Image: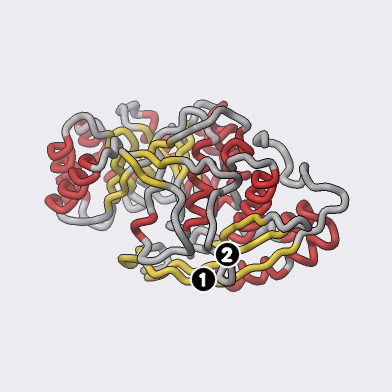
Amino acid sequence: MNSDRDLDADRGADDTLEFDYQPFSLALEEPLETAAGPIDAREGFLVRLVDIDGTIGYGEATPLPGWTESEADCEAALERVQPALEEGGPSAALEAVDQQVAARHALSLALADLQATRQSTPLYRYLGNGPMIGRVPVNATIGDGSPAATSAAARRASDRGFSCCKLKVGLRSLEADLERIRETRAAVGEEMALRVDANEAWSYDEAERALETLADLDVAVLEQPLPAGALEGHADLRAQQSGVDIALDEGLLEHGVDNICEVGAADAVVLKPMALGGIDVARKLAAWVTELGITPIITTTIDGVVARTGAVHLAAAIPDIPPCGLATAELLAEDLGRDPVLLEKGAAVVPQAKGLGVDGVWADE
């Protein structure tokens, strides 16, 4: 579908959709640090739409503290879907969950999967109506660790074919993090693109001090160095023209595209479909920011296989997409079902089956 086409557009007048959902809990390999504290599992809801012919569309709502509605609010929103479908169809159902982004993500993904399956086309072609795409580049994400552990993880990523690594910083002192980045650059050489994600941890003075070193180390992107509210501060950092691109993640959700562009605060924005309310919303934002000269980067919120596969299809629907944060399956100790996306030489192999390409995820199937 075109990025501005309504998900209701292909619905027939006599179409009947049955909606259902199941809760799930997926253990993480290691606890995830969030602004609301560490979590050791990703909990949410798998959703399913079935049409009168038995065609199925799957979606996933996996709330994340600080990014989406609560799990309880998400479930309450999902309870409104079936009555809204019966009353006014998909558009009414989407409107009923519009303020709960994880719930809307699940419903919009299920609708898109259903429509793409009906049309016997991969989801990414339904989203973008573009050419066949075999792979999308992905980055390796490296969490906090000693300089030796960080550089070793980057070397392993390089050996696996990744051409881009994102290093998490901000839990240590600035000097300690810069030493980690120096050792990583020395370990992987000049061919590996490096990104640094501070997750709002630095003050303006720290970010300004870091920029010179990051530029010397040929770091490509500095993501969310300042708190989300510091839009002008990000614009000031970008105005220094250090050669390091400034990317906004939390700042995008707080300020929106118009305000970011008005002050010139970002070279790139990170689009998390779960936090934005769906791959359809993220697709429109990606097209919009691209027209404005801002680079879109797609990432997950450490989701299950249904949402993660949807994000891969989304990335494949965006022309000339840079490496994206989609290689997150290994952060889960378990999953909803078989992963149809293979990682090969630093790229995600895009499923070419109709729709999402996921199966075996519903508990009673």
Q: Position of residue 192 (x, y in %)?
A: 24, 34
Residue 268 is situated, as x and y percent measured from the top left of the image, at 44, 35
| SS at badge 2 | strand
Please indicate, yes or no, whether residue 233 appears anywhere in the rendered image: no
Image x and y of residue 98, in percent: 69, 56
Residue 340 at x, y = what percent? 46, 50
Q: Residue furthest right?
A: 13
Q: Which quadrant of the rendered structure holds the C terminus?
A: bottom right
Please determine whether, in this image, residue 265 is positioned above or below residue 108.
above
* Few, some or many residues within 10 Å of mark 2 (<14, 14–19, 20+): many
Q: Return the residue nearer the eye: 117 or 294.
A: 117
Marks 1 and 2 sit apart, C-alpha to C-alpha, by 7 Å
Whether residue 141 is visible: yes
1 and 2 marks in contact (CB < 8 Å): yes
Residue at the (29%, 35%) spot, across then down = 163
Name which residue type carries label 1: Phe
User: What mark, if any, has residue 24 been given in the picture?
Assistant: 1
Callout 1: 10 Å neighbours few (<14), some, many (20+)?
Answer: some
Amino acid type of the residue tagged 2 in the rendering? Leu
In the depicted view, which residue is nearer to us: 5 or 15? 15
Q: Nearer the viewer, residue 178 or 141?
A: 141
**Label whose residue precedes the other's in the sequence (1 or 2):** 1
**Location of mark 2 (residue):** 46
Q: Is residue 263 above or below residue 277?
A: above
The picture quadrant where one finds residue 291 is: top right
Which quarter of the rendering shows the N terminus?
Answer: top right
In the image, 283: left or right of 28? right
As drawn, 15 above or below 270: below
Tell me the quarter of the picture where residue 173 sits.
Answer: bottom left
Q: Is residue 322 left or right of residue 182?
A: right
